[in-house]
Image: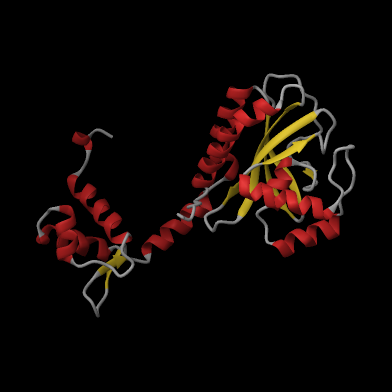
Amino acid sequence: MEREHMVKSVSRALDIIAIVSGHRGGLGVTDISKRMDINKSSVYRILTTLAQYGYIEQDEATDRYKLGYQFLAVSTKLLESIDLRTEARPFLQELEKITNEVIHLVVYDQGEVVYIEKLEGNETLRMHSKVGKRAPMHCTSVGKAILAYLPTAVVHDILDRKGLPVHTEYTITDKDQLLKELEAIKKKGFALDLEENEQGITCMAVPLFDHLGNVVAAMSISGHTRRMTDERLSGLQGKMLEIGHEISKRLGFVPIQS
């Protein structure tokens, strides 16, 4: 937005909210005034207005101002309105345009993944996947991407209940081997399916996280193994991680700063 179209009082109110939000113990009028380089009376008027609407509260013991609980009500409504497919689709379309390959979006449900979006790409590829279909977790890139970030007890429960059925000659059927791969996936941030679910098809997936930091979904790119070479997979890593991060941000995920 161009600066001449901005409303100064609204801009200042938003700046105050941003400043106050960065201080758990709150800030006084003088502190805020110094940080914004505007007079205390202006700061006080804005704080008073925000307080009337519940977006700012004053601590009676310290006289400092902090965020109000109205933000919780607003954020809850925002989170309830978030639709994974809607938020992810522009990013999936971008990836499809770049690669011309099949793009999947799945969610985790009761020890399996469920396809909720599939973009076909322009390259020839016959796959069993379709929207609404369920798939195992141990031999799909999307499944492994989610498994890697689930609690250990949940992972063991899934593997014990579902087993490790063979889908191709490359399917991992040893539990310890799979658990080691899940550890590696968590370090790298992405998962691979090297013809483990369907012969001749290689996939790469990244996990997607919600506002609580829980893994809730995954997205992948799938192509014929002759096209998905080691060199191409290596070149796709950065873009996949970037898009996964962007979709997670749209879901409210805020990564912990190290």
Q: Is residue 15 left or right of residue 193?
A: left
Compared across the picture, whether 203 is left or right of 128 comes to left
Q: Where does residue 59 sit, x and y in percent of width and height?
A: 27, 75
Q: Residue furthest bottom?
A: 61
Q: Residue at x 85, y 55 (%)?
A: 162
Count of number-bearing discs: 0
- Quadrant location, the N terminus: top left
Query: Residue 63's image quarter?
Result: bottom left
**Left or right side of 193 for 97:** left
Q: Considering depth in this image, is 44 or 234 the residue closer to the camera?
A: 234
Can you say whether 173 is above or below 69 in the image? above
Residue nearer the viewer, 205 or 7: 205
Residue 243 point in image, percent of width and height: 55, 37
Residue pictured at 61% horizontal, 26% vertical: 96
Q: Say if 86 sits above or below 44 in the image.
A: above
* Display colour scheme: secondary structure
Could you say where residue 203 lies in the image, as x and y percent from the top left? 72, 34
The residue shown at (85%, 42%) is 171
Instruction: Give the camera-side residue of 227 and 40.
Output: 227
Q: Position of residue 21 (x, y in %)?
A: 32, 60
- Identify the image quadrant of residue 116: top right
